[in-house]
Every structure is written in C-alpha cells, then in structure tokens.
Image (cartoon, rainbow, N blue to C red):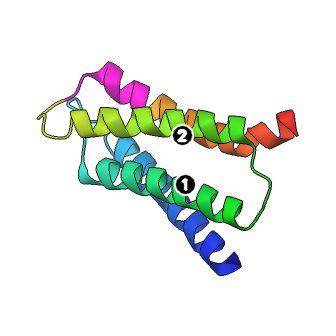
Amino acid sequence: MDLLRHLLLVLHLLGFGALLGGLLVQARDPEKRVNALMRDGAGTAFVAGLALVGVLQADDVPVDNAKIAVKSLIGLVILVLVMANLRKERIADGLWALLLLLTVANVCVAVFWSSVHG
C-alpha cells in the first residue's frame, strides 16, 4: 500500500502542476481560455486526491478530515469551473485569476495546514 500511496501522491502533484502550468502559460495572453492542461490537471489532481485519502484511510493512517474537506471543496470548485468553461473560446480574465487563486490556495492548504493546526 505504501507504493500505491506514493504513486497517488505523485499523480496528485502532477495534476496540480499541469493545472498551474495550463494557467500560467496564458499569463501574458490577452485572451485566456480553458486548455487541455487545465482540464486534465484539475481532473487528475481531484481524482488522485480522493483516491489517496481512500488509501490512507484503508491503511488506518490518521487523516485530517477538515483539511481534506477544504481541499476537496476547492478542488471540486476548480474542476466544475474548468469543465463548465471547457468549450468556450474565451474566458474572462477574472475567471482565469480566480482559477489561479484557487489553485494556489489549494496548494497552500496542503502545505501549511498541518503546521498551523497540527
């Protein structure tokens, strides 16, 4: 199970990397859109994160349910916004900025939550 846990963690991190990369590659573009990197990254990060929690709980590893709830909610909002705007030729700069902010916030929750609450 340890190998599976690490593989899921890597997939989760790669998903966030793809999502963030898909957002940042457009930073200077005057017209922003939801691209394949954002779609695949958001989906991969969300699904791998849920699977990772399942593997941890199956192994009786203590999980901070509040942290998982916050990360899952942020991830779900990102995923819904990405999927809802996937076929649009252009998204508003504010939506692009919101997706970037939510992505960074989700990473910050993952990194800083345990040091603040643990």
Name the amino acid, label 2: Ser
Residue 31 colored in magenta in the image: no
Q: Position of residue 14 (x, y in %)?
A: 49, 61
**Which residue is at 51% across, 65% downward?**
11
How crowded pointer 2 is (Cα within 10 Å; few <14, some 14-19, many 20+) is rated as some
Tell me how far mark 1 sits from mark 2, CA to CA. 8 Å
> Could you tell me which secondary element the residue under label 1 belongs to?
helix
**Which residue is at 20% across, 40% downward?**
86
Quarter of the figure with the C terminus: top right
Q: Is residue 104 visible?
A: yes
Q: Position of residue 2 (x, y in %)?
A: 70, 77
Question: Which badge, 1 or 2, comes first in the chain's sequence?
Answer: 1
Q: Is residue 28 visible?
A: no
Depth order, front residue of 2/36: 2
Name the amino acid, label 1: Gly
How crowded pointer 1 is (Cα within 10 Å; few <14, some 14-19, many 20+) is rated as many
> Could you tell me which secondary element the residue under label 2 belongs to?
helix
Quarter of the figure with the N terminus: bottom right
Depth order, front residue of 24/40: 40
Tag 1 near tag 2, CB within 8 Å: yes
The answer to whether residue 7 is above or below residue 111 is below
Image mark count: 2
Name the residue carrying label 2. Answer: 72
Q: Which mark is residue 49?
A: 1
Q: Residues in magenta?
A: 91-99
